[in-house]
Amino acid sequence: MNSEQTDFEREIAQLLVSSLNLALDPDSIDPKAPLFREGLGLDSIDMLEIALAISQHYGIQLRSDDPENATIFASLRALSAAIAARKA
């Protein structure tokens, strides 16, 4: 288990793994590591899948044309913080 993950980050990590059918343990995702390219190696299609899963699960719209996407999807920690801020 990655003790660096908060409970909410763990919840989002589980959502990422299940929605993208990733062959890895959600607890193994470093919350500060990049989600795309050199990190988990995700791509723009994965971003759309993640946004859809978040929309369905949390009722939050993450738009593909949002200028903040590079920041929002930078890492598990950034994504979790963006979701938490929009849920509040």
Image (cartoon, helix red, strand yellow):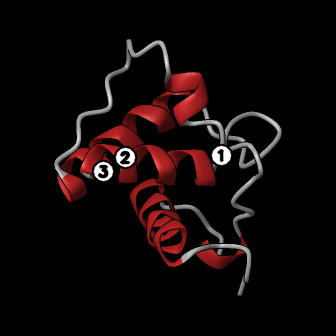
State the residue at coordinates (49%, 54%): 80
Return the x and y of residue 3 as percentages of the image width and height.
73, 83
- Which secondary structure lies at badge 3? helix
Which residue is depicted at the point 16% across and 48% down? 59
Residue 54 place in picture, x, y as percent: 31, 49
80 left or right of 38 in image:
left
Q: Nearer the viewer, residue 78 or 1?
A: 78
Packing grade of label 1 (10 A; few <14, some 14-19, many >=20) is: many
Farthest residue in the bottom direction? 1
| Spatial separation of the CA atoms under disc 3 and disc 1 | 16 Å
55, above or below 27, in the image: above
User: Which of marks 1 and 3 precedes in the sequence?
Assistant: 3
Q: Earlier in the sequence, mark 2 or mark 1?
A: 1
> Residue flagged by tag 2: what amino acid is it?
Ala
Estimate the spatial distance between the alpha carbons at disc 2 and disc 3, rounded to whole Å. Answer: 17 Å
- Provide the residue designation for mark 3: 53
Residue 50, above or below 28: above
Q: Check whether the beta carbons of the residues at disc 2 and disc 3 lie within 8 A of each other.
A: no
The amino acid marked with disc number 1 is Ser
Residue 75's disc is 1
Q: CA distance from mark 2 to mark 1?
A: 15 Å
Upstream in the sequence, badge 2 or badge 3?
3
Residue 44 % position (x, y)? 53, 26
Q: Secondary structure at mark 2?
A: helix
Q: Label 2: which residue?
A: 85
Q: How many marks?
A: 3
